[in-house]
Image (spheres, rainbow, N blue to C red):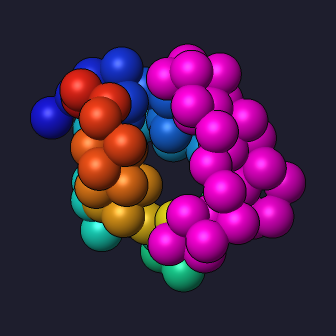
Amino acid sequence: MNTDFHALFAKILKIPADQISDDLSPETATTWDSLAMVDLIVAVEEKYKITLGHEELMQFTSVGALRRLLEQKGVSL
């Protein structure tokens, strides 16, 4: 578990970090709305110094999906 990665989600979604798992998604987190999604994208791009393209953003369906996407882009979590 990457605590910085989970802390980023916890801060934006306003939930405890220990509730962040790969399965967490907009369907399972009531605070993960469209504004939170934009905040997450901006925070991830800034923190990891990357840019996510449209196709990549379409893959961002859960914490685990984003983790895998970042690893594919060479980000070490």
| Residue 69 coordinates in the image, percent (x, y) | 37, 55
Residue pictured at 64% horizontal, 39% vertical: 51
- Choose top left, top right, bottom left or bottom right for residue 64: bottom left
Q: Looking at the image, which residue sits at the far bottom?
A: 27
Does 13 appear above or below 64? above
Dominant SS type (magenta) = helix
Quick check: is 43 in the magenta stretch?
yes
- The answer to whether any part of residue 39 appears in the image is yes
Please state, as top left, top right, bottom left or bottom right, where the N terminus lies in the image. Answer: top left
Q: Is residue 76 left or right of residue 45?
A: left
Give how far across and how far down residue 8 sits, in percent: 50, 29
The residue lying at 43 percent from left, 66 percent from top is: 62
Highlighted range, magenta: 33-59
Counting the numbered discs, the total is 0
Instruction: Identify the image quadrant of the C terminus.
Output: top left
Residue 65 image point, x, y percent: 36, 64
Does residue 61 appear left or right of residue 35 in this picture?
A: left
User: For residue 71, what is the image quadrant?
Assistant: top left
Residue at (54%, 80%) from the top-left corner? 27
Q: Can residue 17 be found in the magenta stretch?
A: no
Residue 29 seen anywhere in this rendered image of the structure: no
- Residue at 61% from the left image edge and 71% from the top image edge: 55
The quadrant where residue 31 appears: bottom right
The answer to which of 58 and 20 lies nearer the viewer is 58
Classify 52 as above or below 65. above
Q: Residue 46 at what x, y percent from top left?
A: 65, 22
